[in-house]
């Protein structure tokens, strides 16, 4: 026994919705259901939608429950994060304060070091990729300052820099393509 469609819509209304939407999948689903409103069979609707009759049935159930908005693909939520707000706050504090070499054994934080710290502190195991995604969501970027020797003399650096002339024009002229003339 086929599932009855909502009575507050008709084929013309669904086609109007299909013209206005920017979601191609929703358009296809609305047009398939419009075929049923026009008196077509579920098999014809499935052919219009390019799917099986079971999928058309699923579309009808979603349409009856939520209307045209029920036919929009929603983002799959995925697995919830292992870190809660308290963990993120502690992570933010330790990153912003920086590592203490005597305690943490590192001079700068790397993802692998932070993964280890999270495990030692909270007994939560996260991968480097997951932690990287979490840190980006918290506003952190993978930037590190270029190391500088503590006894570096900035005035002597200028003497060691290579100074080349700014773009040799002779070199550019020899490599230029000949103009057909």
Image: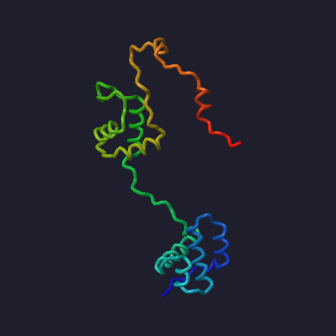
Towards the viewer: 41 or 66: 41
Q: Is residue 11 left or right of residue 63?
A: right
Name the quadrant of the C terminus: top right
Residue 99 sits in quarter:
top left
Residue appearing at x 40%, y 24% in the figure: 147
Name the colouring of the figure: rainbow
Q: Is residue 112 left or right of residue 178?
A: left
Q: Residue furthest right?
A: 181
| Residue 165, image quadrant | top right
Which residue is most to the front?
181
Residue occupying image coordinates x 39% and y 16%: 150
Residue 172 vertical placement versus 50 (above, below): above
Nearest to the observer: residue 49 or residue 79 = 49
Q: Is residue 51 above or below residue 81?
A: below
Estimate the x, y position of residue 24 in percent, counting from the top left. 58, 67
Q: Is residue 125 above or below residue 44?
A: above
Nearer the observer, 180 or 50? 180
User: Image point 60% across, 32% down: which residue?
Assistant: 174
In this rendering, position of residue 23 left or right of residue 127: right
Give how far across and how far down residue 54 sits, in percent. Answer: 46, 79
Q: Which percent across, then down, holds residue 135?
A: 43, 41
């Amino acid at each position: 026994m086929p599932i009855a469609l909502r009575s507050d819509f008709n084929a013309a209304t669904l086609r109007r919705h299909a013209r206005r939407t920017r979601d191609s999948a929703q358009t296809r689903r609305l047009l398939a259901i419009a075929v049923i409103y026009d008196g077509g069979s579920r098999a014809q609707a499935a052919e219009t939608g390019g799917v099986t009759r079971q999928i058309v049935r699923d579309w009808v159930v979603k349409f009856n429950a939520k209307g045209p908005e029920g036919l929009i693909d929603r983002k799959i939520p995925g697995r919830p994060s292992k870190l809660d707000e308290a963990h993120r706050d502690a992570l933010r504090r330790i990153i912003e304060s920086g590592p203490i070499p005597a305690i943490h054994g590192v001079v700068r934080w790397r993802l692998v070091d932070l993964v280890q710290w999270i495990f030692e502190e909270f007994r939560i195991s996260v991968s480097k990729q997951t932690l990287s995604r979490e840190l980006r969501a918290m506003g952190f970027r993978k930037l590190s300052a270029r190391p500088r020797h503590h006894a570096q003399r900035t005035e002597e650096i200028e003497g060691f820099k290579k100074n080349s002339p700014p773009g040799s024009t002779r070199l550019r002229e020899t490599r230029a393509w000949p103009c057909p003339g």
